[in-house]
Amino acid sequence: MKSTKKSTKGTKRFPYIIKCGNAQVTIYRVKHAKMKSGFVYSMTWYEAEGVRRQKQFSKLEKAEYEAKFKAEQLQAGESELANAKLADIRELQAARLIAGDSGLIPALEEWRRGRELCQGPIETACQAWADRNCPKVKKITVSEAVDLFLAFKRSKGVNTKASYERVLPKLKNDLGDRQLIDVNVRRLEAYLEQFNHPATANTHRKRIVTLWRWARDKGYLPAEVKTAAELTDSAQEEALEVGIIDAETFQALLRFIRDNHPHYLAPLALAGFCGLRRSEIHGQKWEDVQLERKFVRVSNAKRGTPARRLVPLCNEAIHWLSINAQPAGDVSPGNTWALDRIRDIARTAGFTLPANCFRHSYISNRVALTGDVNSTSLEAGNSPRIIFRHYRELVTKEEAQAWFGESSINAKESEAM
């Protein structure tokens, strides 16, 4: 990250410009009578085709942080217009898929003629015709429903691999040959009972409910009534105790994984030093781990959400990631959920790891190190409210320095290596 600013004896002069490659963001200082400092700081940038954007902050430090983040986004081609173009491409692909063998243009022409004939919403007219001439429910097996549902989700740009494809194939295997309309509440509850862990059972139930609702909307189940999946009971989950580990434990685990299971070292480093979620680590690409530029672009994050973010890399993170760094490909080895395997390996080796301890430890230590919940929430992909409610534990600044490699713990580690 490069920044250009005119300064005199260490004081900034405005406008203050933040640059990243060809992208730049400008910060203006504007007088404001209601502010205690007498000023607000206006962050301004230009997106594609000269569209000017602006955002104001009460503190210069916050404006600088946001400006650096925005410059990285613009340089990476992630402006709103770039996203819109990608959305247009996906929308065209989805339209072609929906049109099928009919072709997109003939399908649109047919739609237009239908609108002209019924002089209103074509779906209402089609439904009235179907009610008179077709059976109320279209017969379909569970297996066929799963295939159609997954194709529909993919056509909408949904990444099904990390969600539906981890759940529905088992449903298809166990109940695939049954007619969807014949699978009742009792049969679904018996299916869900095979999952001993309540959280796992509820994950399967959630995906099945979505599938059944989709089937109802598409006419494969009776309309305007609750589906059998919706009528099943959720499993009772115990209250989850989320804790943290200290820097010495984390360093010892890093060394253990490095020496015994090196292919899991990078996922562990991303979990502890960057706070990436389990699913984010599973989908992380090496292309988005920028060691020289000292940040990670979260690969498996939904656009338009806080999860879409850049996370800074401390020197300690760069050290551990560099050991097995690759130019491209998946960070998580093979088709495994790396964080689950790391927990199993660590507990077998005698490490005590509370649930979600890597992300929780990262957030707690990052807040202690920076003193800024808002900045930490941006890096963690959550709102400040969620940080306070679920993840933040009080640790000292010295403990936080140890976590991120700014203490004697890591000096000893360097000597050992």
Image (tube, helix red, strand yellow):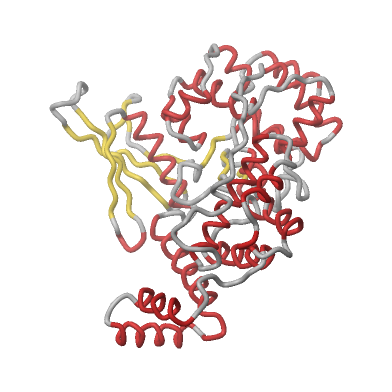
Residue 66 in which image quadrant: top left
In the displayed structure image, the side of residue 247 where residue 84 appears, left or right: left
Looking at the figure, which quarter contains the C terminus? Answer: top right
From the viewer's side, name the closer residue of 26 and 179: 179
Q: Position of residue 413 (x, y in %)?
A: 75, 20
Q: Position of residue 125 (x, y in %)?
A: 36, 78
The answer to whether one can see residue 295 in this image is yes
Residue at screen point 39% across, 60% down: 81
The answer to whether one can see residue 315 in this image is no
Residue at screen point 19% across, 35% down: 30
From the viewer's side, name the closer residue of 31 and 366: 366
In the displayed structure image, the side of residue 257 where residue 157 appears, left or right: left
Q: Position of residue 313 (x, y in %)?
A: 59, 34
From the viewer's side, name the closer residue of 123 and 367: 123
Residue at screen point 32% across, 75% down: 121
Residue 409 in which image quadrant: top right
Q: Which residue reaches farthest left? A: 33
Residue at screen point 56% across, 57% down: 212
From the viewer's side, name the closer residue of 169 and 106: 169
Q: Position of residue 188 (x, y in %)?
A: 66, 50
Numbered marks: total: 0
